[in-house]
Image: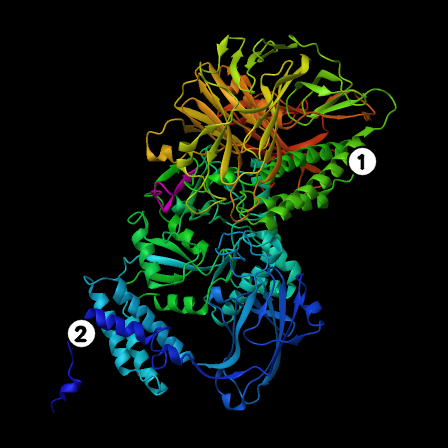
Amino acid sequence: MEEPPSRKLVLKNRRTTLERVEKFISELYFTDCNLWGRLYGATCPVDSLSYFLSEKRISYADAVKRDFQTAHVGQTFGPTWWTCWFKVQITIPKEWSGQEVHLLWESDGEGLVWKDDMPVQGLTKEGEKTSFILSRHMKAEDPRSMTLYIEMACNGLFGAGQGGMIAPVDPKKTFTLQRAELAIFNRAVQELLLDLEILYDMARLLGEDNQRSFQALYVANQMVNLCDVNDPGTFAVVRKLSSEFFSQKNGDSQHTLHAMGHCHIDTAWLWPYEETIRKCARSWVTAVQLMTTNPDFTFTCSQAQQLDWVKTRYPGLYSQIKEFVKLGQFIPVGGTWVEMDGNLPSGESMVRQFLHGQLFFQKEFGSYCSEFWLPDTFGYSAQLPQLMNGFGIHRFLTQKLSWSLVNAFPHHTFHWEGIDGSKVLAHFPPGDSYGMKGTVEEMLKTVRNNRDKGRVNCGIVLYGHGDGGGGPTEKMLEGLKRMKDTDGLPRVQLSTPDRFFSTLERDTSQLCTWVGELFLELHNGTYTTQAQIKKGNRQCEQLLHDVEFLSCVALVQNKDFIYPTVKLQHIWRLLLLNQFHDVLPGSCIQLVVEDALKYYEEIRSGAAKLLSEAMQSLLKPTTSQSFTVINTLPWERTEIISIPGSEEQHLGLVRVPSMGYAVTPEEVSPASPVTVVMQDDGSVTMENGILQVNIDVMGRLTSLKLLSCNRECIPKTCYGNQFVMFQDIPLYWDAWDVMDYHLETRKPVTSVLTKLEIRNNGGLRGVVMFSLKISDNSTIVQEIILEASSPYIRFNTKVTWREDHKFLKVELPTTVHSTNATYEIQFGHLQRPTHRNTSWDWARYEVWAHRWMDLSEHGFGVAVLNDCKYGCSVLGNVLSLSLLRAPKSPDATADIGHHEFSYAFMPHERSFQEAGVIQSAYNFCMPLLTTSMLPTQQKSWSAFTVLSPAVVLEAVKLAERRPDALVLRLYECHGSTVDTWLQTSLPVKDVFLCDLLEQPQCDQPLVFEDQGLKLSFTPFKVLSLLLVLQI
């Protein structure tokens, strides 16, 4: 029998059919009659809703004791950073038996549901979590009445910016409760919505030249034909169509995506540290709930600090996390204390990031992390591969280089080789994101975008709301399950980092190798922003070096001394916390800056007390005029000091042995005293037998001559120590970025406030002083200092800085010609071009270094040293040190105020290695210590000596797990292969080579004889020794 004309198939128009499916599942259009409009059924109000506001973040136990007052939907709460606790009393209607019942909750703030004294789920509208499941299937005998508490933070997922995400915080912002009611949830409707969304996306995105696109479209269209939204009885037939479609498998060669739940939580950024603790709880408890109902769901979690916070503040949740770690669903990754900045922390700080992190993960979860996980940091030091290897890590994941503004990084899966030759297997998720939503579009992009297709046949997908937390949703997870093995899409498997990397490691023969740093061509303003944070980091790193060394010496020499293990751990962890990749770079709100500076003060005061305790254990008070000079660096030093105890400043040139002390050392007569001569034109000439410098009335160097070779450093008509200002207006990321076009706005600072004057006439030290006007609001006051026997000229600088979107630098043009300049990095150095031949070269217009940079040609060069700066550049023959920025977002007060810092210029013969630039930079940053206390025995003593200048003894500390052993960290600093001897006066029983986890690498100790041992180094090799003591 012939079908009626109305039932005959019609020719489908692709556009109208696509839009038909789209409108059928739309949240915006035709919700009165489409499928999405049936997602929730009947609703009813809550029985009662009450609240109280707290300025402080208080515990649940404290909150439930407070007095609550009536609240209502539509009410606003605040201000910013306060907390609103809600008490929600509900009764589920009897007629809802057999139904799935949700509490629908929508507010502008981030919420956490508490039930029966436990956190049970996060509620964040921006994180697509606006309902809490009260019952998946309401039974007649189930309790219908209950009381919930909802802790709402008065901030959004991304803080509380005034008019924009990265804008400064609006302190008076309020947050509205928009919805609070019970509703029946129709899970069958959600299942159909997910099916149709994937079919619609496949039809839309696979393209008209793909047969599978039309198959998906026609199946979706037929589902719409058969689905009666008012008759749930039709749903099973409709779902059968989609199930058949999804069951059509891929071929064997199809690309495989390893999907892992992820929730990148910035330890501080647009919100303070304290709020991060609650973000962790909101995000992770939601992930745990997903694990409960989805045993195949996996979730990766980095940052030991955050886990430690949750362990302390939410012990019940932490116990659940540990159980899911055992099940392999909650997967600790990363191995570091926080996801630290990848450029600015010192080498030893990076070691401690891994050491504290790995020991935490092993203690809490029973194993070390095998992957270094750093998805959101602004570049990656070339020393990281060696440090990873030292902690048993040979796998690395990030995606941040996808943000590079100029050049596209050529790989997603590759070998990364560091400056010492160490390698790790690196993977950048090809979707260029760590916060995917699990959509068809993202899966297709991940395959299409993979720059190593053919070399590998797999990639990672990290899905879940990130940065501000939130994590994966049930919808994301269910969508990925539908793409498990569907023809037309890449295979998607719920996976783990270990499963993915193990797959890669089966054959890496086709992978390329990238050698050297992973430089992010963006965010290079973060090398300079928030100068006080940078200064605090450098100073505290150096202070902890001294505290640990002197505490170790005290432990050996005084049996009553107790090594301050617990206090040092606390202080180190504060420092490591502040090295998070939005704190140390300065890309954070004012409240975070205040917290960071407070922590630096705590570190300084705590470390100063520990330093004093160690010195008091080693030395004793005396009434004599004698004094002790302490050298914490591993080479003998001859330097100018201020003699303690004298009413007027008295200087002395003294010699102190390496890593030791000297009591009232005999003052050394300089080969040539400093002379300071004022010229008729108001300029000054200073000379110390090593350097001769001419300084004009503006404080600029018109000449800087190295006398040993009579070589002039500064070209004619140029000026050294030239301060320059630039306009600094980036495209968007204010605190983060300095754009290349800022270089077109260079303006020298030439307005003199006070002309050059002599403050110290010479002898052991010559000092001249001047001041400049930067603007009506900002000034520079500078002392230029030349000391006897010093190879460099020093600039002590004070800046009053009240600028908007300006950038202050100081320049040193030189007579050196070289295509490369050298910059200190962690445990070594690297070269970068001084020319701009290629886009890769030009993208490095602003780079970073630690204590020094150097421009050398054969036989001669000039170095710039600094005590707390990182941003710098060398273009052609001009070395430039970046001093201060003035961004206005996310902290409108960034860098406004008073700054003090020092830098130095050091001309030299031969290479910078042979000239001692590296040692001079250490000396510049870490002055000799003086005290009026005296030792009870020897008048001159040295704990350690390294015979080769190519090897630096960087750290001496107590071993983490052996109270009878010290750990020594040494590295090769010249870039050479060298054998050397380490000598010590300490009572040593045995010496073992150990890894960075402080585990001996073999059972047999090294040969230790005549209080020394021979060590072999290759270029930039980091070596750790375990010294077992005779105590």
Expressed as whole percent of the image width and height from the top left, the position of residue 67 reads 71, 73
Q: Is residue 31 in view from this perspective?
A: yes
Q: Which marked residue is nearer to the observer: mark 1 or mark 2?
A: 2
- For the point 60% across and 46% down, the residue is 593
- For the point 53% across and 12% down, the residue is 706
Tag 1, which secondary structure?
loop
Expressed as whole percent of the image width and height from the top left, the position of residue 23 reads 31, 74
Residue 661 figure quarter = top right
Residue 588 is marked as none
Amino acid carrying label 2: it is Lys
Farthest residue to the right: give it.
623
Segment tinted magenta in the rendering: 405-417
Q: Name the residue under label 1.
A: 559
Expressed as whole percent of the image width and height from the top left, the position of residue 875 reads 41, 26
Badge 1, how many Cα within 10 Å: few under 14, some, many 20+? few
Q: Name the residue under label 2.
A: 12
Expressed as whole percent of the image width and height from the top left, the position of residue 197 reads 33, 70
Farthest residue to the front: give it.
776
Q: Which colour scheme is used?
A: rainbow
- For the point 27% across and 57% down, the residue is 253
Q: Is residue 1005 in view from this perspective?
A: no
